Image (spheres, coloured by chain):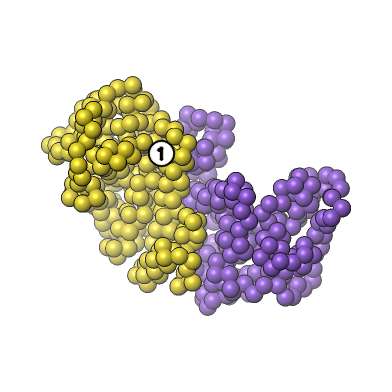
Chain colours: A purple, B yellow
């Protein structure tokens, strides 16, 4: 079904779609084709496939009952969180056309991934309460860290927050450097990534989907969501996680 | 494993790879990054993910024992055949850099897909004998057509050949029109697609992997591989298969 869905997005023009989801996605694709250039559509299409690829991994983990290690979890979350197609819409929504050599440069790729991961970790946090209530906490950064470090939920929350904040700090630092000499379109895109992080955090605290729907079991405490003026310290050094460690390399 | 492999390709620079396959793919990625621009690397990376996505579908079909319909089969084959990453290497091997607006235009996307499908259908043909011997003929264009049309293998071979030839003819016709006004890089790429079709057909008849390894069961006849001076006629009109029907639309 996922592959058929993806194809309905790839096909230009209206196609006799097999089901309502494919029809809706085909319609979105058609609108994008009217609104923007083929390069922007192709970026969205590829991002959408990467998302489905990540979700497939997530579903497979769930089916096998296995909890991934931190490095695998972060790799999976970069794709399964849906951040890639979301951020691929920045160009479309804002009428930007970031040239390929800029968009595909390692530093910009890293910034996109950082924004996705920060938003994904924030999502892990604000969806934890609801997932706990529905006993769906199979794979999130807290359960993964508890398993990886053999620690309490409280400690895992601290570690996860520190990891998230380290990525956020690196994002801000690298983005500022990349913005020097960037095209107007790229600067607009990078600004949009930041808005995406903030917007996602705001949305997660207001969306009915994530609001508390009851009481947690006695032995569980949902991590509180708070705004902080400065990054949490400590937490796992991201460099040993090869999947994101390269973000701290000299990329520009 | 597929997702971990894919990630080893995405990461710039050498990474401590988890297994030998990831290490080899990471090495290929590093060589490509030295040889060509980030846009060409990104195209290969996306093509590689699309391939794994298609192979995942193929494996899932095999696991469930289901034989897809023709439209689904063609969609799957466009990705599972490995044509996308193969053709993404044309730019890298030839030192071409096709501009995004040209590469992502629907006509060029269609030509790439046509070349992939012709090669994939040729592959179905020259691997049929070996697959028959190993009783692995679960999913190929012949079994799919036999099931779809309720026909004999002989008739399915005729229909598959006619379909393949129709796509080939459309490829030649559309390519000629796209070449007018195309950049040198795009012309080089489109020429490479044609070489890929021919090279694949030659290779399939010589590679030890596909040569006969014994006698077929009495009730099976492998379709003979022959060169033809003109296209086979008849065969299913491709337009009712939405996944490829748009190739015959007015794309330029």
**Left or right: A9 in relation to B234:** right
**Residue A59, image x and y in percent?**
59, 47
Q: Residue at x 53, y 35 (%)?
A: A22
- The image shows residue A172, relative to residue B21, as above or below, that is below
**Left or right: B229 in relation to A31:** left
Q: Can residue B116 be seen at all in this image of the molecule?
A: yes
Residue density around tag 1, few if under 14, some if 14–19, many if 20 or more, within 10 Å: many
Q: Which residue is more in the foreground, B181 or B148?
A: B148
Q: Residue at x 49, y 66 (%)?
A: B18
State the image quarter where residue B233 is shown: top left
Q: Residue at x 37, y 41 (%)?
A: B77
Q: Can residue A184 be seen at all in this image of the molecule?
A: no
**Left or right: B208 in relation to A211:** left
**Residue B137, image x and y in percent?**
32, 37
Q: Residue furthest left?
A: B229
State the image quarter where residue A116 is shown: bottom right
Q: Residue furthest top?
A: B150
- The image shows residue A213, relative to residue B23, as above or below, that is above
**Residue B178, image x and y in percent?**
29, 46
Per the image, the residue denoted by label 1 is B75
- The quarter of the rendered structure image containing the C terminus of chain B is top left
**Residue B84, image x and y in percent?**
36, 51
Label 1 marks which chain's residue? B
**Left or right: A17 in relation to A58:** left
Q: Which residue is more in the foreground, B21 or B170?
A: B21
- The image shows residue B22, relative to residue B209, as above or below, that is below
Q: Which residue is more in the foreground, B157 or A40?
A: B157
Q: Residue at x 42, y 47 (%)?
A: B55
Q: Secondary structure at mark 1?
A: helix
């Amino acid at each position: 079904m996922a592959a058929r869905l993806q194809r309905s997005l790839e096909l230009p023009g209206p196609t006799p779609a097999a089901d309502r989801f494919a029809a809706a996605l085909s319609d979105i694709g058609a609108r994008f084709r009217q609104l923007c250039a083929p390069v922007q559509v192709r970026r969205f299409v590829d991002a959408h496939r990467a998302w489905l690829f990540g979700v497939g991994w997530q579903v497979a983990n769930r089916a096998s009952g296995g909890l991934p290690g931190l490095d695998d979890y972060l790799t999976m979350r970069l794709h399964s969180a849906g951040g890639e197609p979301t951020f691929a819409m920045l160009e479309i929504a804002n009428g930007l056309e970031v040239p390929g050599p800029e968009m595909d440069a390692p530093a910009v790729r890293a910034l996109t991934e950082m924004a996705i991961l920060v938003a994904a970790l924030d999502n892990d946090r604000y969806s934890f309460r609801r997932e706990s209530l529905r006993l769906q906490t199979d794979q999130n950064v807290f359960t993964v860290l508890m398993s990886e470090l053999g620690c309490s939920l409280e400690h895992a929350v601290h570690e996860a927050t520190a990891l998230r904040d380290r990525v956020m700090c690196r994002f801000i630092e690298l983005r500022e450097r990349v913005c020097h000499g960037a095209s107007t379109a790229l600067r607009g895109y990078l600004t949009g990534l930041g808005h995406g992080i903030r917007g996602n955090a705001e949305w997660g605290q207001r969306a009915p989907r994530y609001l508390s729907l009851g009481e947690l079991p006695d032995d569980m405490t949902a991590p509180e969501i708070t705004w902080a003026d400065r990054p949490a310290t400590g937490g796992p050094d991201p460099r040993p996680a090869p999947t994101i460690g390269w973000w701290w390399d000299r990329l520009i």
